[in-house]
Image (tube, coloured by chain):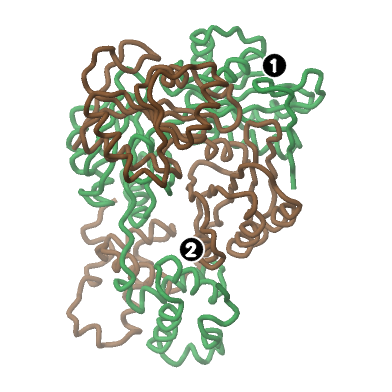
Chain colours: A brown, B green
Amino acid sequence: MVGVKLARPEAGDIRERGDSSGLLVLAGTPIGDVADAPPRLAEQLRTAEVIAAEDTRRLRRLTQELGVEPTGRILSYFEGNEAARTPELVARLLEGAHVLLVTDAGMPSVSDPGYRLVAAAVEAGIRVTAVPGPSAVLTALALSALPVDRFCFEGFPPRKAGERARTLAALAGETRTMVFFEATHRITETLRAMAEAFGPQRPAAVCRELTKTYEEVRRGPLAELAAWSEDGVRGEITVVVAGAAPPSPQDYGVEALAGLVAAREAAGEHRKSAIAAVAAQLGVPKRTVFDAVVAARAQVGQQDEADGDGEAGDGPDGGISG
Amino acid sequence: MVGVKLARPEAGDIRERGDSSGLLVLAGTPIGDVADAPPRLAEQLRTAEVIAAEDTRRLRRLTQELGVEPTGRILSYFEGNEAARTPELVARLLEGAHVLLVTDAGMPSVSDPGYRLVAAAVEAGIRVTAVPGPSAVLTALALSALPVDRFCFEGFPPRKAGERARTLAALAGETRTMVFFEATHRITETLRAMAEAFGPQRPAAVCRELTKTYEEVRRGPLAELAAWSEDGVRGEITVVVAGAAPPSPQDYGVEALAGLVAAREAAGEHRKSAIAAVAAQLGVPKRTVFDAVVAARAQVGQQDEADGDGEAGDGPDGGISG
């Protein structure tokens, strides 16, 4: 178990000068408006000994716009070179360097290579901290007017039509609000594929150019959004889609209930906890799920009895409390 | 369908003066370090005609720390009064007011009442925009050293032990990295319940006091984190838990495959798309799932044949491309 405890002398100054150990700082960068950059980001850009940036030209533009002159060395760190760069950066951290990691826009680690550097640094016992900043994910969620008490982030859907259709089909029953990124030239086909997978009337919001001059949030059913997008949608796009309405428990028959339990058992869960989980998931009594498992076994026939697996006979509540 | 297009004259100044329509701005606030507040937040606090704040005392502290003198009226807006306050705020917006919504810490709408005001404002045709800021969710994810290409946010687990156990049990098969909030006095019991539901060895990270002086990120298996937390964990806590390893397709038997299809059909999906979705979800050929559905029907016996439902006979690829 790796524990990291930071003692900072004052806000804005993460590390005491003269500290001999390295420090990795993950900082969020503006998603559109440079006035969204906090003072701590400017301070980090000024003082870091190494700045690992997804795109060094975008970083230079950012430092110029912020009026900051970086004193450290600037390195590129992106999907194409992360395997080679990660050990190099960890070596600098072990030498005691203060390394800042920034991406093109938003919080590092979300849909970008940052996570591998964090994992390697933690593995090496390096202190890791963050300067939180803007995120397209949370900005889009806040503007979507959809429920956000629970949500999931899915990143970019697959580019190939078949793989995309399968990925979206697998999300058709997801009850949480979903967030996706998408490229301008694929937004219409993706919205159509979503309408196909989730139903044309599923509420959604297409957010583009968040915090920029032409910020636009378009809310409506997926089919309407797909039709609207045919005229072209410019800029960086975040799509928020309402989750599926949870089905009513009465909609589930014996086969479905027993099958959900069997699927969890296949995934390595014990039957008792699988029954409890399915009951919790669907909001039905454990007894109902247990009875379905027993009924399904009876239907399948006697051959299973010979397996000597009497677990289901323990009853739904045996050993399960709460 | 409601579309919102913003044209802003310059960065930092969201609305042209003299604009007759109302504007709702959602702004993120620091989660610990006031130096994480961007210039746009200060500008909003200075210029908004109405500030709706989750906790007006915390807001006053924030404006003092930022050296900002709000000119607008400050109203409380929290779970207890949102039902009454929402129409009042929408009325002000319809009169043309510039309303700023802030919560105690982090981005509005995430695990707080903001979403209802956004939904009501959008319904009333009001422009809604956001000033993105810090978020404990994304900061904790970035520091967790866990994969964050896909994640889900679950908010606070239920307080009652039984309900909490059921909620966590329903998440045992979740393959995305999960983020939870938890209170200091419940963290040990929650980590224990997580170890019970997800397994003692499931990797996780407990983050407390993010961006504050005593920021600490503790990473390790759930059982170890639960034991460590017994000494007491102070401050605001965000827990990040690795998702479940996806089971291998061979682990699924006929009953499980057919049951997953039946569960999707119960939720209103057509059989063909349910078969495609289950195949996509598990990464197995559609044929395998289709065969399982046919085999399960055969096992159940002849009585189902009499129902005259010949859909499964169409084959797994009939009408489904990609």
Q: How many marks?
A: 2
On screen, A150 above or below A171? above
Pinpoint residue A184: horizontal percent, then vertical percent: 64, 49
Marking on residue B322: none
Q: Residue at the spot x=44%, y=93% of the render?
A: B302
Q: Nearer the viewer, mark 1 or mark 2?
A: 2
Considering the numbered disc 1 on the image, is that residue within a helix, a strand or a loop? loop
Q: Amino acid at mark 2?
A: Ala
Q: Who is closer to the viewer here, B127 or A15?
A: A15
Q: What residue did someone put label 1 on?
A: B49
Q: Residues within 10 Å of mark 1 (few under 14, many from 20)?
A: many
Check the image and report above or below for A236 versus B250: above
> Residue A170 bears which disc, if any?
2
For badge 1, the amino acid type reads Glu
* Whether marks 1 and 2 lie on the same chain: no
Q: In screen coordinates, is B108 left or right of B295?
A: right
